[in-house]
Image (cartoon, rainbow, N blue to C red):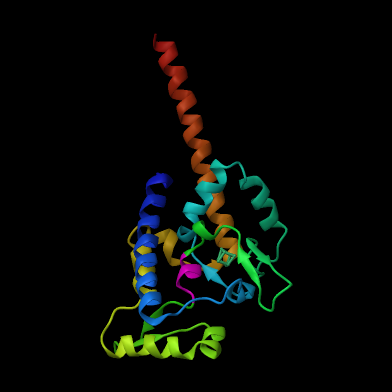
């Protein structure tokens, strides 16, 4: 599998999602509280391997993969995401240190909904915003009542599955999903390099 091509496709889906979230934010005035990292404090965040393939490529290219693999191996199986940087000066404060490369769940959280069995859409707001910006939440609910589009979790999960069913189906604790993504991309780079060296040697021998 060519992980570069896979990463481009995943990032295209993320681009679509960003556009939808942007539209939702503009129409409802829903936005995160500055420096809030509430969602990343959770220790039960799960995502798929595919979700982090773009991050894994980025870290391998920047020569940062070994460092983060060691950090993951020394972290708890079900712990807080290793890329979260806590800010103890504010309640719930903190930030994602790889924001541009974060996974699907991180992009959906607080700005998406899902479909009920009867086809009805339901919005899942973040607990903090529910208490602090109920006007915005009401506007999103009005959007749904008016038949307007909001990002739907299952639709985005299916979009990733259509890129690679195996890598996008099983969900793991977030650090494990990142670890497997790093290992898969690492193997790919290793075998690609080996293959290139072998081909070059064969070409030289043939001359
Ligand atoms: S990748 Fe970033 S946004 Fe996602 S859980 Fe980790 S710190 Fe939070």
Residue at 52% from the left image edge and 82% from the top image edge: 126
Q: How many marks?
A: 0
In the rendered structure, does residue 44 fall within the stretch colored magenta?
Answer: no
**Residue 46 picture quarter:** bottom right
**Residue 179 picture quarter:** bottom right
Residue 105 pos. (x, y %): 48, 70
On screen, residue 188 above or below 88: above
Q: Residue farthest to the top?
A: 207
On screen, residue 71 above or below 137: above
Specify whether residue 151 is in view. Answer: no
Specify whether residue 127 is in view. Answer: yes
Give the main secondary structure of the magenta stretch: helix
Residue 105 is left or right of residue 23, and the answer is right
Residue at 65% from the left image edge and 52% from the top image edge: 68
Between residue 140 and residue 72, name the one nearer to us. 140
The residue segment tinted magenta is 104-109
Between residue 165 and residue 90, name the one nearer to us. 90
Residue at 65% from the left image edge and 51% from the top image edge: 69
In the rendered structure, does residue 106 fall within the stretch colored magenta?
Answer: yes
| Figure quadrant, ligand 1 | bottom right
Quadrant of the rendering where the C terminus is positioned:
top left
Residue 23 pos. (x, y %): 35, 73
On screen, residue 173 above or below 127: above
Residue 33 pos. (x, y %): 56, 77
Residue 125 is left or right of residue 91, and the answer is left
Between residue 133 and residue 182, name the one nearer to us. 133
Residue 85 pos. (x, y %): 67, 64
Residue 158 is left or right of residue 192, and the answer is left
């Amino acid at each position: 599998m060519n992980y570069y091509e896979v990463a481009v496709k995943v990032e295209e889906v993320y681009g679509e999602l960003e556009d939808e979230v942007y539209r939702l934010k503009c129409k409802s005035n829903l936005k995160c509280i500055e420096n809030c990292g509430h969602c990343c404090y959770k220790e039960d965040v799960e995502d798929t391997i595919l979700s982090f393939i773009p991050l894994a490529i980025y870290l391998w290219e920047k020569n940062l993969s070994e460092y983060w693999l060691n950090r993951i191996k020394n972290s708890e199986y079900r712990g807080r995401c290793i890329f979260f940087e806590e800010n103890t000066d504010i309640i719930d404060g903190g930030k994602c240190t790889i924001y541009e490369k974060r996974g699907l769940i991180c992009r959906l959280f607080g700005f998406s909904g899902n479909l009920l069995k009867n086809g009805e859409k339901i919005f899942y707001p973040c607990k903090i915003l529910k208490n602090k910006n109920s006007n915005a939440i009401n506007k999103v609910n009005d959007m749904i009542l008016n038949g307007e589009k909001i990002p739907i979790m299952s639709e985005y999960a299916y979009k990733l599955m259509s890129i690679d069913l195996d890598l996008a189906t099983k969900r793991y604790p977030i650090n494990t999903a990142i670890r497997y993504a790093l290992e898969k991309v690492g193997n790919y780079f290793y075998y690609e390099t080996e293959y290139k060296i072998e081909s070059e040697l064969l070409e030289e021998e043939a001359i």
